[in-house]
Image: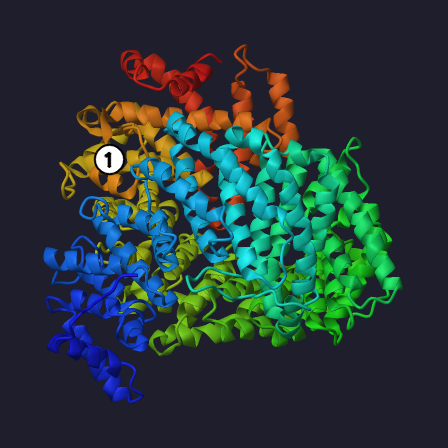
Amino acid sequence: MANFNIVVDEDQQWLLNCLSATLDPNHEVRSFAEASLNQASLQPGFGSALSKVAANRELPLGLRQISFFYYYAAVLLKQFIKKHWHEAEEAFEHPAVSSDEKAVVRRLLLLSLDDSHRKICTAISMAVASIAVYDWPEVWPDLLPYLMKLINDQTNMNGVHGALRCLALLSVDLDDTVVPTLVPALFPCLLKIVSSPEMYDKYLRTKALSIVYSCISMLGVMSGVYKTETSALIVPMVKPWMDQFSKILNQPLQSEDPDDWSIRTEVLKCLNQFVQNFPSLIESEFMIIVGPLWQTFMTSLGVYVQSSIEGTEDPFDGRYDSDGAEKSLDSFVVQLFEFLLTIVGSAKLVKVIMNNVEELTYYTIAFLQITEQQVHTWSMDANQFVADEDDVTYSCRVSGALLLEEVVNSCGTEGIRAIIEAAKKRFSESQREKDAGSPIWWRIREATLFALASLSEQLLEAEDSELTRVGSGNLLEQIITEDIGLDVHQYPFLYSRIFSSVAKFSSVISHGVLEHFLYAAIKAISMDVPPPVKVGACRALSELLPETNKVIIHPHLMSLFQSLSDLLNQASDETLHLVLETLQEAIKAGYELSASIEPIISPVVLNMWASHISDPFICIDAIEVMETLKNAPGCIRPLVSRVLPYIWPVLNKPQQQPDGLVAGSVDLVTMLLKNAPVDVVKTIYDACFDTVIRIVLQSDDHICCDDFGQNATECLAAFVSGGRQDVLAWSGDLENTMRRLLDAASRLLDPDLDSSGSLFVGSYILQLILHLPSQMAPHIRDLVAALIRRMQSAQIAGLRSSLLLIFARLVHLSAPKVEQFIDLLVTIPAEGYDNSFVYLMSEWTQQQGEIQGAYQIKVTTTALALLLSSRHAELAKINVQGYLFQSAAGITTRSKAKLTPDQWTVVPLPAKIMALLADALVEIQEQVVAGDNEDSDWEEVEADDVELDKDLMYSAGVTSSGRPSHQHLEAIAKAFNKEEEEDRYEDDQLTVADPLNQINLANYLAEFFVNFSQSERQMFDHIFQSLTQDQRNAIQMVRAQ
């Protein structure tokens, strides 16, 4: 241990007095001391003075601690370093620390790393790590040698602790320039510590393992580029480290011993990195781990059941060590599952557990039981129950379910059969416990259902095939019918799980059982039962109602509506979402009763929407319920008459409303407008149009510049889309209304307006162009100039893309005289560019690949084809961004990225346009190939479309090269468009009227390339040679049809 003889001079004494005053119970004294320290931090020598206080071991501990733990639970010295050490730091404040003072601070901190007080040692380590980010290794070359010296000094365990703590912090930020030289020198020292439990305690061994983990993680990242070099580093260390890992895991897990859990957690993390990054290198040594791993797994279950599930021992939930690392049993088990999941997911190592897959699934199910803490929390707070179930929170239940899912994915039918057999055994065990009178028999039953429900998709797929049918429906029906007569008050969580499981497996459960639980769920909503039971009932109804025979459900709907309305008044937060979702499905199931249910439902939902206006998620759910009600027969007019009197005063006096109410009211108006009959649009127009457009035009109103801008823009677009030409006549003054609409567009295109406020202006202008073309024609030049200015000031890529769509639509409107539109763009200036056309094409060619949505892709892609077909002379004059240069070998760290930013080639505009059109064709081809892959997203297309596509593929044939025919491309394009439109239902309401929406992109591109290659053969051949092989293949395929 270093000895210090630091003289306390006058300045040091002043600092000590200030530090002491920060502990004074008098608030004024504390505040004055804190302000004085702030001022002192701006004076030369403050950092070294703090370091001397920390290093002076003759001072009282309390004063030394405050020098590190002041300022919002962070260390005062660490804050000083962050603010004044390096001028490039974002949080830097003048003055900068001098080089001489830095040297003093670094020296004192290193000499203080062996402090016997754990908290001070940790704080010093944090300060050292903070400085190392800036100074090591260039300015501080002696840091690592000094730390290595401390680690190897067995006579100074405090020094070992300080060095390990410091290295643990440093190792997180190591890069590929340091790790290769650090590992050979450091790992033997770390191995000695880990392998010497008689000399080093579990804390120190755990800290050593955390450094190993960080280094192995970085080597894994490096292996993608430096495979040979990393292999050379890894191979010599595999066997000795595997030996140590096996020794640690081979001991039975200790109960109420968080240090034992922590060291195993670090072992599992290290193993996980080895398996993920170097499976081939460790395969030969991995068997030594299997037995000890199974020992840890088995003994962990016993400890977990006693500590967490039964609650008879301390699981140390929510507790952390002095370094901030979690010590709970739950976090250890989660890490255990994560490693097992990695093994099961490894093609090389899954065979290790194939012979024991049934045992693995059997014991995993036991880990899925509800813990005593969860029972307590969920019983007291239904919102937490819903949140934990919906949000897939970090827990053993979720991790275990993910492991079972990976077993199915990796082991296929064998995995499914293993899970079914394990579930049968667990069900039988729970039945025996139930018969024996055990008070916790229901937990393993609930865990079994939870496991099956988590795998419902995979199990149902297996049931669809005669080759893999495993009888999951029969098993589930056996389990749930056994518990039909349960007391819901005594077993609320089991009953809740039964409800949700029935919904998950409705397709393989008999109609009689389904009807029983459907009625039971409806009844539970209205009864005085525990909240978890109501949650399960809502889950069941939201999934069962869409598939239920309407004749069966109709007699019960009125009582269900009343019960759900009552439940809305009782629910809050997370449970509100669930109740609203259930209500929405109930409305869809009872469309025939819509006229009679509207007076019951809409007032409750409207009041609930208003009372939760500050919660955007609940507001969205409430508006969706009202939209479902609006779409029901005979409901739109009474709903509108009920909503308008409520929201008109809000919109009329926006300044006097609470936050969110104005924007929410506009959302409500927008919802009512979409797909509404013209007379309803007129009614809404009379009540709300003037107020909406007036608020938009109030340029000094912060509401317009903030969240309201987006809502109001969508609302105006809906007015124009719903009213079309009539929207001008309804006011009695066509010119005035048109002028106001243009003024709103001008306001939203103001380049000084925040980008978020203009985000949906493209949709609004698109409606003006589509539905008021003759009125917009005289204003095209001004519109183009405003669009260019807004694009150049936009900070959000999505806004630029939406404005590009307007330009693309204007290109189409100018056809067949596209060259005249180009001439117009050339005459309009653009800041920093020769003209607007140069800027537009530079931006367009960069953004095209990022544009989303079937309609948007169609319009922009075909517009590019029109521009290229125009053969305008300006096209050849413009060069745009081409392809990204490949970076030099090595890992691209943040510092390297700053020094060597991305570099791009420059290509002529015609070549770039043709490449983008070819890319669109390539993407369609890739979707064709994906359509034959059973794991592809294309499987989500409706069955009829899939069958149609397959019929077309085989009837039209496939080319000799194995590439799909053009007819197949056409079918896929149609399915692609349909899927995209379903995903973007909101946008489709405003674009469906555009004739361009009917374009078949595959046909269009094929025809374009055929015609262009014939009419512009010389240009085509020249550009064709510059394309990639994939692009050339795509074009050749359609030309060969």
Looking at the picture, tell me which residue is in the foreground, 338 or 16.
Answer: 16
Residue 824 in view: no
| Left or right: 15, with 523 as reference point | left
Circle 1 is placed at which residue position?
842
Image quarter of the N terminus: bottom left
Q: Amino acid at mark 1?
A: Ser
* Point 48% across, 68% down: residue: 615
- Element carrying mark 1: helix
Percent x, y of residue 51: 21, 65
Q: Quick check: 583 above or below 402?
A: below
| Left or right: 44, with 715 as reference point | left
| Left or right: 42, with 648 as reference point | left
Looking at the picture, tell me which residue is in the foreground, 144 or 88.
Answer: 144
* Point 40% across, 70% down: residue: 662
Q: Quick check: 60 above or below 797?
A: below
Looking at the picture, tell me which residue is in the foreground, 785 or 16.
Answer: 16
Q: Residue furthest right?
A: 435
Percent x, y of residue 307: 66, 64
Percent x, y of residue 253: 63, 54
Residue 388 in view: yes
Quadrant of residue 922 in the image?
A: top left
